[in-house]
Amino acid sequence: MKSFLLKCISISFVFFMSFKQTTQDFQGQAYYFSKSTMDLGTWGARMSEAQKKEAQARLKNRLEKTYILSFNKEESVFKEEEKVDAISGATDSWGSNFTRGEQYKNVKNNALVQSQEFYGKRFLVKDKLHSISWNMGKETKKIGQYLCFKATASVPTNELAWYDFSWSDIAQTEQKKDSTEVPEVKMTSVEAWYTLQIPVSNGPAEYWGLPGLILEVSSGNTTILCSKIILNPKEKLTIVAPDKGKEITKSDYQATVQEKMLEMRNNRGRRN
C-alpha cells in the first residue's frame, strides 16, 4: 500500500508541475465511444438468433454512440455526435426524446446545465452535480498512452439516467404516493479509469470528481471508452453552458416527462 501511495504521489507531482506550467487557457477534447448491451428479457426468449441480430441492428443508433467532451480545468461540455440510421437513413427521432442532451458541468461551482428536448419543447435543466463517493483502487492499466488508475462507486441509478424514461418509473412514483414506507433506492455499480496525466476533475456523462480525467467508465449495461485526446488544440475551444429553453430542475423535468407519457397512454386508452 505504501509503494502504491508513493507511486501515485510521484506521478501526481510530475504531472502537476507540467500542468502548472501550462497557460491559464488549458483546454482539451476527449472523444468517447459508448456501447450498451440489450436485454431482451422474456421477449428475447421467443426470438430466433436472426431476429435478435435484426433487432440489435435496428437499435444500433441507441446502443452505440460517439461523444466529444470539450474541457478546461473547471468546465466541460459533453455532446453526442448525431448519426444517421444505416437502415432507414433517418435520425432516431423517438429515441432522442429520452437521450442525454448537450451537457455542461462546472466542477468548481458544482453546477450542471443540460439542454433537453422533449416532443418539440426545449428545456434547460439547471441543478447541482451529483456528488460521487469514489473508492480509489490500486489497479492500473494503460489506455492509449495514458496510465490509468481504477476507482469504483455505487451511484443511485436515477442519477445516472434522470433524462430517460421507463414505465416502471411511473409505477414507482404511484407506489410512493400510496405507501408511507421510505422507498428503497436502486443503486448502480460504477467502475472508472482515470489518468493523472490530465489532472482535471472531469469525465464523460454524469461522471466526475476524480483527480484526473476519466477515460473509461462502465455502469450497468454500458461502457464509455475514450478513443482520442487532443490537448491545447490550435483553435481555441468555446466552452459555455447552453442557455435556451424553459429552466427546470432534474426532478421537475422527470415529473414533466412522466406526466406527459401518462397523458399519452390515457389518451390512447380512450380512443381504443
Image: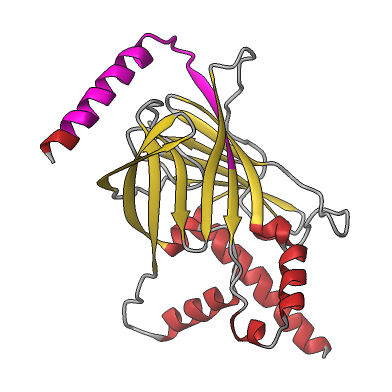
Q: Say which quadrant the C terminus sits in.
A: bottom right
Question: Which residues are drawn in magenta?
Answer: 5-32
Q: Position of residue 239 (x, y in %)?
A: 57, 26
Q: Position of residue 109 (x, y in %)?
A: 39, 33
Q: Say which quadrant the N terminus sits in.
A: top left
Residue 22 is covered by the magenta coloring: yes
Q: Is residue 65 above or below residue 180?
A: above
Left/right placement of residue 245 relative to residue 91 reads: left
Q: How many marks?
A: 0
Q: Nearer the viewer, residue 90 or 24?
A: 90
Q: Nearer the viewer, residue 206 or 173?
A: 206
Q: Position of residue 224 (x, y in %)?
A: 53, 48
Q: Farthest left residue?
A: 2
**x 46%, y 54%: residue:** 218
Q: Is residue 24 above or below residue 217?
A: above
Left/right placement of residue 27 relative to residue 209 reads: right
